[in-house]
Amino acid sequence: MQVEQVDLAQLAEQFGTPLFVVSESRLRANYRRIRDAFAASWGGSVNVMFAIKTNYSLAVRRILSQEGAGGDAFGPGELMATLVAGTDPARTSLGGSGKATAAIHEAVARGVRITVDALDELPRIAAAARDSGRRAVLTLRSKPRLDELNDYRSVASPYRMGAEIPLGDWVWDNKWGLTLEEACEAVRLIEAAPELDARGVHSHVGRHYGYTPQYVAAVPGLVRWIAELRDQTGWAPAWVNLGGGWAMEDDPVLRGPGSQRLAGGHPEMWAHPRGPIEEIAGEVCAELRRRLAEANLDVPVIELEPGRYIVTDAVLLLSRVVSVKNQPGIARYINVDASVAHFPIPELQDAANPVVVVDRLAEPLDGATAIVGPSCFEDLLSWGRPLPVLEAGDLIAFLGAGACADSYSATTNAIPRPAVVLVADDRADLIKRRETIQDIFNRDQIPERLWHTSPA
């Protein structure tokens, strides 16, 4: 089995396991496909801003910067990584709630725009603009009533003690964005501050609602919010950012056992394959154009912040079987050297990542298995999936492993995180070295006095 022109067994021998393997050609192809889909459907300017939260490998970010992708960064760490990789600051946005003042100053000084989430950010942004001598470009994160979304499903709300509420109400409940009243006040404050320049509106529903009609159903409420803001203030945006959540057709999260739970009483949502991105882009852009025209709004530019769509199927996790424990009537446990501590999506989100046994694809299946990692909790990487007879030393590849591994990873049981290799044609480059046990404990310090005293 190969990634591009490189054999996986060769990669395991050279770099060890567990190992994340990135396909450069697939990464570039995914970016171009979603960019072209929206550009063709919108018929105007489109800024595709990679959500770096989904993959922290700087080489991945550099490849997308070469392709012309802008950047979506939450917080100073993601902002630093986005800029270090050569992303155009003018096509990059600092988002998030509770922004640190230092991050605001860094963004303004570097010419990065800021997505405003709260009114109390504005005085700090203005101060940063005065200090740097630059005018700060702003996007207002919207908090509209998306009543049309309530027709689709219910969601457990952490803000209501886990009670199930309609999806549109969940969007209203969550912490992000400015209400219409707050946005009107923000526009007035910005227009009174010459160092501030409001240019766009931002909206985000979320990738785990990846069903085409839901993307379309979010548009009317967003446009109503923009039109009401225009009517009350006279201000209208030059761009609309449609946020992220653009999962692939075969996203493992949308094909796992949790998909019925995500359907929220509408299992028919998951009875058909999700549409290709060209279909989604076409329906969303058509609805957006129609609603904008009805509201007499002219928005020449749209933006989106894909992450999962670009990286999910561009990465696999290569792992080696450590032992096999067959307990008839209970389970056949395949113990591997990978862990959900470093690849948490299968367990956290009930994702069904495809699993293949490297170089044994044609062998007959031999009953369901539970693939488990070495940590002290369940560590279920895959369950209920038939596989061939396996033994220690066999190589297993978990496909669709590109999203959120780094950002969700932990050091459970002091298990070092995997290395990452980038494959391009017949070349393999190490782009992130394997973590060591020493790395895990490098931040620790034992006070000198503890070496020279005895317990009471």
Image (cartoon, rainbow, N blue to C red):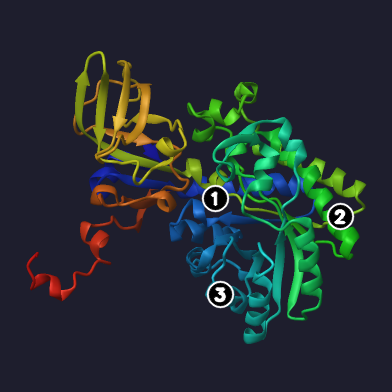
Q: Residue at x 75, y 62 (%)?
A: 182
Tell me: 79 left or right of 340. Answer: right
Q: Residue at x 26, y 36 (%)?
A: 336
**Amino acid bearing label 3:** Thr
Residue underneath mark 2: 228
State the SS at label 2.
Answer: helix
Q: Earlier in the sequence, mark 2 or mark 1?
A: 1
Q: Position of residue 275 (x, y in %)?
A: 65, 31
Residue 282 visible here: no
Tell me: 306 left or right of 9. Answer: right
In depth, the one of 439 and 65 nearer the eye is 439
Q: Is residue 441 above or below residue 263?
A: below
Q: Are marks 2 and 3 in contact (CB under 8 Å)?
A: no
How dense is the environment of label 1, judged by Cα within 10 Å: few (below 14), some, or many (20 and up)? some
Tell me: 2 left or right of 175. Answer: left
Q: Is residue 360 above or below residue 93?
A: above
**Amino acid bearing label 2:** Glu
- Tell me the quarter of the picture where residue 201 sits: bottom right
Q: Is residue 165 above or below residue 40?
A: above
Q: Residue at x 78, y 81 (%)?
A: 194
Q: Quadrant of the C terminus?
A: bottom left
Residue underneath mark 1: 28
- Tell me the quarter of the picture where residue 279 sits: top right
Residue underneath mark 3: 101
In depth, the one of 392 and 151 nearer the eye is 151
**Amino acid bearing label 1:** Arg
Label 2 or label 1, whichever lies nearer to me, is 2
